[in-house]
Amino acid sequence: MHFLLDPLSQRGMEALKKTAVIGIGNTLMSDDGAGVRVLEHLHELPDHVTIVELATGGMTLLHHLEDYDRVVIADAVDFGGEPGEIRVFNPDEVRTIKTVGYSLHDLDILKVLDLAKQLDMLPDSVRIAAIQPGSLEMKEGLTPNVEAALPELARWISSEITGQAGISGSGISGLNNGKPVDKE
Amino acid sequence: MKEININVEHLTRVEGHGNIVLNAKNGKVEKVMWEVSEAPRLFEAFVRGKPYHQLAQITSRICGICSIGHTLASLKATEAAMDIEISPQSELLRRLAIHGENMQSHILHLGYLISPDLFGTGSVVPLVRTHTDAVLAVVKLHRLSNEFSEVVCGRTTHPTNLIPGGFYKTPSPLKLKEYRQKLLDSVETANLVAGIILDNAGALPDFTRETEFIALTAKDEYALYDGLIGSTDAGTYPVDEYVDVVNEFVVPQSTAKYCKNKREAFMVGALARFNLNYDHLSPLAKQWAKKFGLKPVCHNPFMNNVAQLVEFVHSIEDSVSLIDRLMEDYKDEPRPEITPKAGRGVGVVDVPRGILFHEYVYDKDGYCASANCVIPTNQNHNNIQHDFEAFAPSLLDKPEKEIELNLEMLVRAYDPCISCSTHFLNVEWKR
């Protein structure tokens, strides 16, 4: 007799999806590196989850998308919030593409995601786990508010992966329940 | 007669910052200039006082595109300075590393930066809709090139596995075999991309100015990893004499140095290698050269793009045969142990944009006392300027936008990596 989770249930299917957490940013540009630094806070992830430190990989984001059913992209995003504030959203939920993407190579990840969509390389699910930067100066290290928010951002990424909704009630400040970012 | 004033600030689809200036009046060019405005990089000063095992790691950061090339030039300079020998297996593996990088860089340049000029679009984005299969093929080849580099070098960019004396860890034979197959499978995709470029190659201007070409050259291979300094004007030079070949000098309009040898300027890169080493290209590479009408010695700088394509195919074929040679007797080799000693060494490799030199002097404990790096794009700036002077007068009848595009395409054909080329500023320049 086996007591297994029903493999065909919704939760079971979620668990089988090949998932990647992709960290984007430049750790030499202060808070721009938050999307990379948060990867250090991701522990005990399930086997089907791969962590990709893309950093300033730019167009090579394309190469990582087609291998996964589900991708969570961690990045510093200026959505006009307070430094360290977190938002999690779908790419098509943001209105201005200029909102996202600080890179020395000046590449907008939303543009890459749009290219991927047109090339039919987009995973079933793409979520952007965004953190508001406080400074984008050319220096190592995050500003205190952003550094302090990394564990929270990591918890959000984990909850995206596991599909557990537990965190939404945890009172994370500024969290918009994944609603569209209103830039204008 | 019309007056033409073109000022392209921060030319796009090249790495780094450069400007184009053209002023013409009454059908005469008054001023045409290729300006390099990047800040100096100071790497030669950074490495002074650093231990030998850090030099390749530091200097690989000169570039995010040809970091494998910088690593190899650096390792070869260190190994030459300390009389360190590497195993035949490591030599073959390093040849794979340089092929991987050539493939990465060439497909990125052709697929993302040059194709918009061939199709008359401003960027690659509109091509995604109109030429979806071609863009997918480029993405596929770029990905393969990156992954292949990672298998050999530990990382696609800023490699971790290449160290003085050989390899930190012998690359997995299973992975090498896997990528041998993937390389073979990619030939069809490469042919598809080459065919599309051929169909649109008419967009490349027919412009010729005779110049000197300088590249590594060897008797028995298409030289990328090792050889002598070859010149289409002057035969060969020993690597140690590179300073007297590149003859760096400074000009007011550029933070990067200029170079010249036998003529007023010379060119390095894929076309220079093609011109000097054509006989050693792989069979399929020669076939593609023929289809494009590319023959040595070709003096049209726009054909550097085609030479890159030819080299891409060559790198696929040569990598497959190198892996076959490696697998005849592949061993898990121990990590090399180095005893530092004092000395001076020059390292040379021919990387995507051309011949690259690193030279170091070490003290008896293996700390760097002085360094000199001569980057390919540096060696090309002067040739770009001379091409401008020859090309611009022939363009004056065209609409301004078209003149601008032609000059931009000329710079892009050199695939310049401008940030790499701006480095150690010399006090003479400031006077």
Image (cartoon, coloured by chain):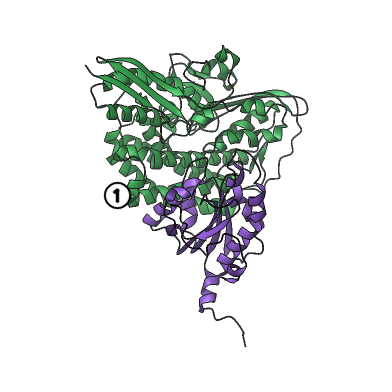
Chain colours: A purple, B green
Q: Residue at x 29, y 40 (%)?
A: B119
Residue ranking furthest to the right: B365
> How far across and down, in percent of the image, does residue B127 sit?
33, 47
Say if A12 sits above or below B331 in the image: below
Q: Which residue is mark 1?
A: B130
Q: Specify the quadrant that holds the C terminus of chain B.
A: top right
Say if A42 sits above or below B24 in the image: below
Can residue B219 be seen in this snapshot?
no
> How far across and down, in percent of the image, does residue B319 sit?
50, 43
Q: Which image quadrant is residue B430 in?
A: top right
Query: Which amino acid does the dot numbered 1 rest on?
Result: Thr
Can residue A54 be seen in this snapshot?
yes
In the image, taking residue B145 as reference, residue B425 lies left or right, namely right
> How far across and down, in percent of the image, does residue A95 sit?
41, 54
- Tell me the chain of label 1: B
Give the crowd class for mark 1: few <14, some 14-19, many >=20 residues within 10 Å: few
> How far across and down, in percent of the image, does residue B100 sit?
51, 42
Say if B356 sits above or below B237 in the image: below
